[in-house]
């Protein structure tokens, strides 16, 4: 009889009932997802729809029995809940799903881990800036100062050093980024395609692989990881300026006081003693000389004009500043206008923005992403390191903000308060510090709130 039973695939029905929807409650374990869902359900049932509850623990007991808590098993459990919710919603049911969705939770943990390890604030939060741990030796300001050495030196490598607290996601922390000074490197190994393989350091018996490196390179061209110094174009003018400074110093030193000249008296036949007096003559509070009767000791000045090195030195200064796009600094010494200085300053600010973006790109790729990868794997999205735009806007004073609020141009809401607390370095607001403010009905200035 079984030989007449055949498997047959039925097409999915296209019939749908209107009114179905899904509410997904997510949060940490024990946060009240199921409780809230069962409080919302009766209110929905009063309006007609059939309510179905999909609790994460219940689904794991039946539909997802046997699944663990790895990332793959968590993804499978969420996909099954979503599939059932879609089927019920298609037939007009109101589905209330309560399950831990690890994506945002994991991303938030990744953001907090990176912010804590790097000692940087999280954008959009009003909490205090995380402080670097005293047990480790990593400081973002110090690292940034060392990373910027790639501008004058051309390149600046760092070696990643981690600390493993416990073998779980989020248990690996960045202990430090150890600088490997360019002068101590003996080799930079590059692949045929120009990618970095490793670096070798004097006194270290093993190469440092690229997986453990953070390499900042200024003006990199192809596979040249040595980069180019920001000061290289200005070196010629600096060298010539140094020579002019030496000439100017020698001119002042030699001719500023005059040349001592000794004239012997009528009865003086040997001038050796007078010559010695002239050679030993020095300027000072106790300077002086005793000479024979009718002898003369004079300080002979320059006959004619001395060479003036100031215009040449000023020219070299301008060329050095021009190579670093900082020639607006020379305005005001002789000529220059505010409008011209502002234009030049805009170019300089743009160059600073470019440098900051390069630093952020390397840090995101080889610090932030590596830190997330060792904790949660390469498939987990990583937070981004960002920087405030340099010189693009001026921060308003507290008095100006008050005027804007009083005029109604700004609303005294939560985002504004978070922004001001973070900018002014104020502590986070406690729940009982101020009552909640209705954005539609802001308080009137001067009245009690």
Image: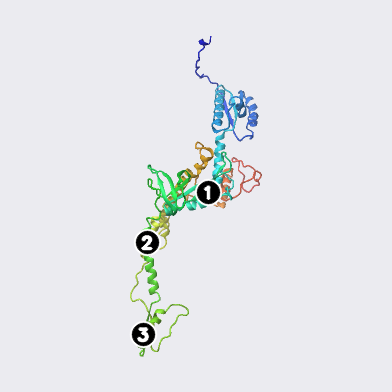
* Residue 271 circle label: 3
Instruction: Identify which residue, 63 or 53, lies in the foreground.
Output: 63
CA gap, disc 1 to disc 3? 73 Å
- Return the disc, 1 or 2, that comes first in the chain's sequence: 1
Closer to the camera: disc 1 or disc 2? 1
| Whether label 2 touches label 3, CB < 8 Å | no
Which residue position holds label 1?
176
Q: List the single residue furthest toward the front.
A: 205
Question: Residue 44's quadrant in the figure?
Answer: top right
Earlier in the chain: of badge 2 and badge 3, it is 2
Query: Within 10 Å of the Cα at label 3, are there few (<14), some (14-19), or many (20+) other Cα atoms?
Result: few
Residue 147 lies left or right of residue 91; in this view the side is left
Could you say whether the residue bearing mark 3 is in a helix, strand or loop? loop
Query: What residue is shown with label 2?
Result: 239
Judging from the image, the colouring scheme is rainbow
Q: Crowding near pointer 2: few (<14 within 10 Å), some, many (20+)?
A: few
Label 1 sits on a secondary structure element that is strand
Label 1 – label 2 distance at C-alpha? 38 Å
Specify whether residue 54 is in view. no
Quarter of the image where the C terminus is located: top right
Image location (x, y in percent) of residue 282: 43, 78
Counting from the top left corner in percent of width and height, residue 130 is at 57, 47
- Against 326, residue 272 (above or below) is below
Tell me the mark number nearer the camera, choosing from 2 and 3.
3
- Residue 34 lies in what quarter of the image? top right
Residue 353 or residue 392, whichever sits in front: 353
**Image spot of residue 302 (x, y percent):** 35, 76
């Amino acid at each position: 009889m079984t030989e007449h039973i055949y498997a047959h695939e039925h097409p999915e029905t296209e019939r749908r009932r209107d009114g179905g929807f899904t509410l997904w409650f997510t949060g940490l374990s024990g946060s009240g997802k199921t409780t809230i869902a069962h409080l919302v359900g009766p209110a929905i049932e009063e309006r007609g729809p059939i309510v179905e509850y999909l609790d994460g623990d219940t689904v794991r007991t039946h539909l997802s029995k046997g699944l663990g808590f790895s990332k793959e098993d968590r993804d499978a459990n969420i996909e099954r809940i979503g599939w059932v919710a879609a089927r019920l919603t298609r037939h007009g049911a109101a589905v209330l799903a309560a399950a831990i969705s690890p994506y945002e939770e994991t991303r938030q943990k990744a953001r907090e881990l990176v912010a804590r390890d790097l000692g940087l604030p999280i954008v959009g939060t009003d909490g205090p800036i995380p402080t670097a741990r005293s047990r480790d030796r990593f400081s973002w300001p110090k690292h940034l100062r060392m990373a910027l050495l790639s501008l004058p030196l051309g390149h600046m490598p760092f070696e990643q050093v981690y600390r493993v607290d416990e073998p779980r996601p989020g248990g690996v922390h960045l202990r430090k980024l150890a600088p490997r000074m360019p002068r101590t490197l003996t080799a930079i190994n590059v692949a045929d395609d120009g990618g970095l393989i490793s670096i070798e350091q004097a006194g270290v018996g093993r190469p440092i692989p690229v997986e453990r490196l953070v390499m900042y390179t200024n003006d990199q061209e192809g596979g040249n990881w040595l980069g180019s110094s920001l000061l290289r174009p200005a070196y010629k003018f600096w060298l010539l300026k140094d020579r002019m400074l030496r000439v100017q110093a020698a001119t002042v030193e030699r001719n500023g006081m005059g040349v001592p000249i000794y004239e012997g008296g009528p009865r003086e036949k040997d001038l050796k003693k007078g010559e010695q007096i002239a050679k030993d003559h020095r300027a000072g509070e106790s300077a002086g000389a005793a000479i024979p009767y009718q002898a003369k000791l004079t300080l002979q000045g320059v006959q004619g004009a001395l060479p003036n090195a100031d215009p040449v030195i000023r020219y070299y200064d301008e060329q050095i500043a021009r190579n670093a796009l900082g020639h607006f600094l020379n305005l005001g010494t002789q000529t220059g206008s505010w409008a011209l200085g502002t234009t030049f300053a805009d170019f300089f600010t743009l160059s600073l923005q470019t440098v900051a973006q390069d630093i952020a790109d390397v840090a995101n790729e080889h610090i932030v992403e590596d830190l997330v990868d060792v904790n949660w794997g390469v498939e987990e999205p990583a937070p981004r390191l960002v920087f405030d735009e340099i010189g693009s806007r001026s921060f308003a004073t507290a008095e100006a903000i008050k005027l804007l609020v009083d005029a109604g141009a700004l609303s005294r809401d939560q985002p504004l308060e978070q922004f001001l607390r973070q900018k002014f370095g104020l502590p986070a607001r406690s729940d009982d510090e101020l009552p909640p403010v209705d954005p539609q009905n802001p308080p009137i200035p001067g009245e009690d709130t």
